[in-house]
Image (cartoon, rainbow, N blue to C red):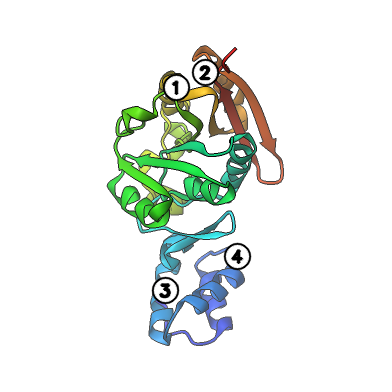
C-alpha cells in the first residue's frame, strides 16, 4: 500500500484505518511522537500499513510500565503476560535467583528484576536476534545466553533457581496459520509453535525444571484455558506441585509448578 507524505494526525489516522488498524487513533499518536520529520513519519506509516507490528515499527513495546526494545523478527511481549510477572513477583524470595527461558526481548526478566529488590537474573533464547535484543534490554541487570532451553545456563545454577519464568510457545501447530498476520508473518515461528497440542516445549521444560529449581522454587508458564488441565498434569508428572492462576481481565492463564521445600 502506498502512503503519501503525512503531516496531520487526522491524515495518519485515515491511512491506518484504510489499512485495517483497529486502534488507528492511538497508533497514529505514537507514530507522530516517534517521527523526527514528515518523511520519517510517512515511512513509519507505510511500514505499519504494510502489516508490520506496531512494536516493530516503533522499535519498542510497552510492558509492565517500561518501554522494551523490540527488533524486527523478535517476539513482541504481550500485555497479558504481565500477569505472569505479577505472579512471579508474589512468589519470589529476597535476593531471588531468576531464570527467564525463551526470553525473547528479555521483557519478563527485566520486569521482574525491576519489581524486586535484588535479583540474580539469567535469560536465554535459541534465536540469535532475540538474544541480541535481550542483551540491550537486560543490560547490567543480568546475563543473557544463546541456546536451547536450559543448555546454555551455567551449571552453578542447578538446584538454585527460585523463579523460573518460561514464556514458552504454546500455539498448537495446526493453529499457527490461524494467527493474525502480524504474528504469523513477522514473529519467529519457534516463538509461537508449541507442537501438536501446543505443549511440547512445556513438557521439555517441566522434565528438566526440578533439577534447576531450588527447594520451594517455582516454574511459571502461560497456557490457554483449554490447555490448563493437561498442563497441570504435565507439572505434576514432573514432580512439581501445580496450581493455576487466572486473570479474566487480561485473558491470561498461568500454571505454576513448585518444587518440594526442604523438610
Q: Indicate the position of residue 224 as horizontal and vertical percent values.
A: 58, 33
Give the x, y percent position of residue 181.
Answer: 44, 52
Give the quarter of the image for residue 1.
Answer: bottom left
Would residue 178 be seen by someone viewing this image from the given angle?
no
Distance between the Cα atoms at labels 2 and 3? 44 Å
Image-quadrant location for residue 211: top left
Q: Is 36 on the left-hand or right-hand side of 258?
A: left
Position of 262 relative to 110 (above/below): above
Query: N-terminal of the two: label 1 or label 3?
Result: 3
Residue 44: horizontal and vertical position, in percent?
42, 73
The tag on residue 44 is: 3
Q: Secondary structure at mark 4?
A: loop
Mark 4–mark 1 Cα distance, whole angstroms, equals 37 Å
Q: Earlier in the sequence, mark 4 or mark 3?
A: 4
Name the secondary structure under disc 3.
helix
Which residue is under mark 2?
234
According to the image, label 1 marks what residue? 203
In front here: 152 or 42?
Answer: 152
Amino acid at each position: 500500500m502506498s502512503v503519501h507524505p503525512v503531516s496531520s494526525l487526522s491524515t495518519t489516522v485515515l491511512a491506518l484505518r484504510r489499512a485495517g488498524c483497529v486502534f488507528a487513533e492511538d497508533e497514529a499518536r505514537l507514530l507522530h511522537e516517534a517521527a523526527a520529520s514528515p518523511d520519517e513519519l510517512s515511512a513509519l506509516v507505510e511500514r505499519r500499513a504494510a502489516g508490520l507490528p506496531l512494536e516493530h515499527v516503533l522499535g519498542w513495546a510497552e510492558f509492565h510500565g517500561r518501554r522494551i526494545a523490540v527488533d524486527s523478527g523478535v517476539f513482541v511481549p504481550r500485555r497479558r503476560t504481565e500477569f505472569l510477572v505479577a505472579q512471579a513477583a508474589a512468589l519470589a524470595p529476597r535476593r531471588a535467583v531468576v531464570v527467564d527461558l525463551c526470553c525473547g526481548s528479555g521483557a519478563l526478566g527485566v520486569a521482574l528484576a525491576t519489581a524486586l529488590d535484588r535479583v540474580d537474573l539469567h535469560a536465554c533464547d535459541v534465536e540469535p536476534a532475540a538474544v541480541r535484543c535481550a542483551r540491550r534490554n537486560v543490560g547490567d541487570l543480568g546475563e543473557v545466553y544463546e541456546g536451547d532451553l536450559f543448555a546454555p545456563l551455567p551449571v552453578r545454577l542447578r538446584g538454585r533457581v527460585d523463579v523460573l519464568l518460561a514464556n514458552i510457545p504454546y500455539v498448537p501447530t495446526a493453529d499457527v496459520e490461524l494467527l493474525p498476520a502480524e504474528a504469523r508473518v513477522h514473529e519467529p515461528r519457534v516463538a509461537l509453535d508449541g507442537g501438536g497440542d501446543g505443549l511440547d516445549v512445556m513438557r521439555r521444560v517441566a522434565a528438566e525444571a526440578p533439577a534447576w529449581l531450588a527447594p520451594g522454587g517455582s516454574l511459571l508458564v502461560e497456557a490457554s484455558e483449554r490447555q490448563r488441565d493437561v498442563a497441570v498434569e504435565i507439572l505434576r508428572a514432573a514432580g512439581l506441585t501445580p496450581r493455576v492462576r487466572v486473570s479474566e481481565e487480561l485473558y491470561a492463564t498461568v500454571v505454576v509448578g513448585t518444587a518440594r521445600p526442604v523438610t
